[in-house]
Image (spheres, rainbow, N blue to C red):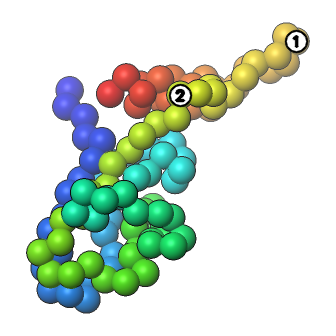
Amino acid sequence: MAYVTEITYTQSGSTNKDFIVTFPFLATTDLRVQLNGTTKSLTSDYTIVQAGGTTTIRFNTAPANSDTIRIHRETDIDAVKSTFQAGSSITASDLNNNSTQFLYASQ
């Protein structure tokens, strides 16, 4: 099965500020945004808007015509999403989140 961990847009016109994230991710902190190969910063360059099941990268200033926008996922693997303690309940959502984190990291 094919997997997609990034999308690239080419700005057409100079007023579009919104670019949709088309791939799955666990946390918005896993999203990275580049403009013409330069990594951009959350809040100072763009915001992340989540509404109606859609995630959108919204630039503070619209990229120039023909600029290339790359949005990709970098899954954090420094710590597992859920840690289990002896005697505590193990939930399906915790197991699924850990499995998804490892799947995304391997991709």
Residue at position x 30%, y 42% in the image: 5
**Above/below status of 19 relative to 94:** below
Real-space CA distance between mark 2 and mark 1, rounded to the nearest whole angstrom: 25 Å
**Above/below status of 1 relative to 21:** above
> Is 47 left, or right, of 32 in this rendering?
right
**Percent coordinates x, y for residue 16 in the rendering:** 26, 83
Q: Is residue 8 visible?
A: yes
Element under disc 1: loop
Q: Is residue 50 visible?
A: no
Residue highlighted by disc 1:
87
Mark found first going from the N terminus, 2 or 1: 2
> Is 20 left, or right, of 82 in this rendering?
left
Q: Residue lying furthest right in this view? A: 87
* Type of the residue with mark 1: Gly
Residue at position x 43%, y 81% in the image: 60
Q: Residue lying furthest top in this view? A: 86
**Percent coordinates x, y for residue 76 in the rendering:** 52, 35
Quarter of the image that includes the N terminus: top left
> Is 64 left, or right, of 78 in this rendering?
left
**Percent coordinates x, y for residue 50 in the rendering:** 50, 66
Seen from the viewer's position, the closer of residues 8 and 88 is 8
Residue highlighted by disc 2:
77
Residue at position x 17%, y 72% in the image: 67
Residue 39 appears in which quarter of the rendering? Answer: bottom left
* Type of the residue with mark 2: Ile
**Percent coordinates x, y for residue 91 in the rendering:** 70, 25
Disc 2 residue crowd, few under 14, some 14–19, many 20+, Cα 10 Å: few
Element under disc 2: loop
